Image: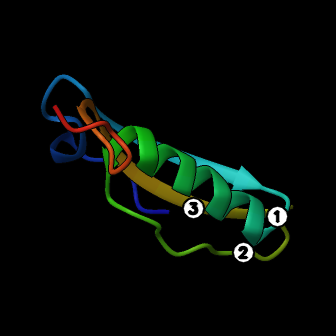
């Protein structure tokens, strides 16, 4: 994965999450759960690195903004 740069975490509440799991379905389920609670970059691509166990994905999130499942006032 590309390195995280200053723009990715320029403000309080912004995070970059690198997710590693045993299979694509598990990693996608985690990204979906994160998307429900926080404003995120959405369900990203999942990749497999040769010689490395499992699959990987990256998601960007703003933990100060609610996700798509947040109740409406």
> Circle 2 — which element?
loop
Where residue 19 sits in the image (x, y, percent)?
62, 50
Q: Residues within 10 Å of mark 2 (few under 14, many from 20)?
A: some
Q: Nearer the viewer, residue 63 or 51?
A: 63
- First reached walking from the N terminus: tag 1 or tag 3: 1
Q: Mark 3, mark 2: which one is toward the viewer?
A: 3
| Label 2 sits on residue | 48
Nearer to us: label 1 or label 3: 3
Classify mark 3: helix, strand or loop. strand
- Residue at screen point 23% across, 45% down: 8
For disc 3, the marked residue is 57
Q: Earlier in the sequence, mark 3 or mark 2?
A: 2
Residue in the picture at 42% in, 38% down: 37
Locate the C terminus by quadrant: top left
Across and down, in percent, residue 70 comes to 32, 39
Counting other residues with Cα less than 10 Å from the Cα at mark 1, is it few (<14), some (14-19), or many (20 or more)?
Answer: few
Tell me residue 16's x, y (percent). 39, 42
Please give the name of the residue rendered at 50% of the width and 63% of the height, measured from the top-left corner. Answer: 1
Q: Is residue 37 left or right of residue 13?
A: right
Left or right of 14? Residue 2 is right
Q: Which residue is mark 1?
A: 52
Determine the CA span between mark 2 and mark 1. 8 Å
Q: Which of the 4 image quarters holds residue 11?
A: top left
Is the residue under label 3 in contact with that under label 1 (CB below 8 Å)? no
User: Secondary structure beneath disc 1?
Assistant: loop
**In front: mark 2 or mark 1?**
2
Q: Nearer the viewer, residue 4 or 16?
A: 16
Along the viewing direction, whichever of 71 and 5 lies nearer the viewer? 71
The single residue placed furthest to the front in the displayed view is: 73
Quarter of the image for residue 9 reads: top left
> How many numbered discs, if any?
3
């Amino acid at each position: 994965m590309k390195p995280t740069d200053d723009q990715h975490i320029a403000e309080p509440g912004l995070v970059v999450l690198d997710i590693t799991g045993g299979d694509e379905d598990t990693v996608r389920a985690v990204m979906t759960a994160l998307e429900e609670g926080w404003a995120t970059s959405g369900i990203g691509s999942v990749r497999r690195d040769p010689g490395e166990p499992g699959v990987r994905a990256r998601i960007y999130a703003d933990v100060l903004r609610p996700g798509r499942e947040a109740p409406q006032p």
